[in-house]
Image (cartoon, helix red, strand yellow):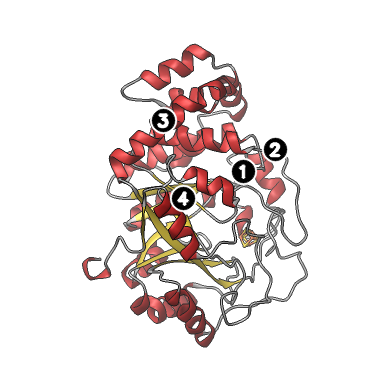
Amino acid sequence: MSFKDQFEKHSWDEVKESIYSKTDLDVEKALMSPKRTLDDFKALVSPAAAPYLESMAQLSHQLTQKRFGKTIQMYIPLYLSNECTNICTYCGFSLDNKVRRKTLTENDILQEVEVIKKLGYDHVLLVTGEANQTVHIDYFKKVLRLIRPYFSQISMEIQPLDQDEYEVLIPLGVTSVLVYQETYHQDDYKKHHPKGKKSNFNYRLETPDRLGRAGIHKMGLGVLIGLEDWRTDSFFTAMHLNYLERTYWQTRYSLSFPRLRPFSGGLEPKVEMNDKELVQLICAYRIMNEEVEISLSTRESEKFRNHCVALGITSISAGSKTNPGGYAAEPDSLEQFEISDERSPGEIAEMIRSKGYEPVWKDWDRVIS
Ligand code: SF4
């Protein structure tokens, strides 16, 4: 039994039609309901909800503050490798993008860690492309042993692994793993992933199940916004989250909403999502789910991120480099995508404080992990 069984009972077109046929009454019912359903979520992400954005924002703000207080967690990505054996049409690391490849050595990693620690971080997100020959389980083990003394919290955004591989990594200090489905539209998924292991839609779809069975503390879900209709993709993400929370109830969950950004060799988004729509989506998830953590990366602009602090997000990255060695070891290597908010971690922390919130650099201690 996995999410795939539930997923296969739903048709993309029917879900889409049902979202687009929601009315004012459906939105009002969703806003007033004491316990919201996935059908309410459809109403909250529908075009009919656009005029209710202010009410949604207020409710999202209240619910977030009730559960998380006035805090925003700080994290930073550490790109370990831009090697990748997959072709993904939207990514600068894609195999067919003829650029110089780099996988950090232990010495490179220590140089990166030194800079990241000076910035004040205690939570690092390790990111790699998917290259089985070089960026494999033994490489991950080596890296985790190397950096564990420097960080209380280590997250990973790496290739999907088997359950037994996750079971090896978790005791080495991994507290959370992010795995984005990119899109739940199977035909478009095929179009955007024509080559490599990632072209296996179902293996990716079932990754959160493998993580849950391995006993991960937290996992992150999301889609790449711009590949397909964002409202429908978000519904499937919400359904996936709902399933996982019921099945692996000891695990915590986070969501991200990466919007397609320019990169070397770039793909234009099929579907544009404007800032108001992203606010609507953040609020819809929060109103639907009071527990889920919501993260906003440096893909988003300075102005937008300032605005979102009080709306429903709970974690934010700052000072990010999206190229391996970007902090110190090899600043000129290829980046995965261009970042938009270039402020330093100190400036972001100050912005958070100016809004009456507290930036949290550490919310986990490996002594108790
Ligand atoms: S999205 Fe991931 S798997 Fe696809 S090309 Fe980029 S790094 Fe490789």
Ligand 1 is found in the corner quadrant, namely bottom right
**Rounded to the nearest whole Å, what is the CA distance between mark 4 and mark 2?**
21 Å
Task: Indicate the amino acid at tag 2.
Answer: Val
Q: Dots 2 and 3: beta carbons under 8 Å? A: no
- Tell me, for residue 271, which label it has, or none: 2
Q: In this view, does 215 lie above or below 232?
A: below
In this picture, residue 199 sits left or right of residue 365: right
**Rounded to the nearest whole Å, what is the CA distance between mark 3 and mark 4?**
19 Å
In this picture, residue 157 sits left or right of residue 188: left
Q: What is the crowding at mark 1: few (fewer than 14 residues within 10 Å), some, or many (at least 20)?
A: many
Q: What is the crowding at mark 3: few (fewer than 14 residues within 10 Å), some, or many (at least 20)?
A: some
Task: Indicate the amino acid at tag 1.
Answer: Ile
* Secondary structure of the residue carrying numbered label 3: helix
Q: Is residue 222 above or below residue 229?
A: below
* Secondary structure of the residue carrying numbered label 4: strand
* Secondary structure of the residue carrying numbered label 1: loop
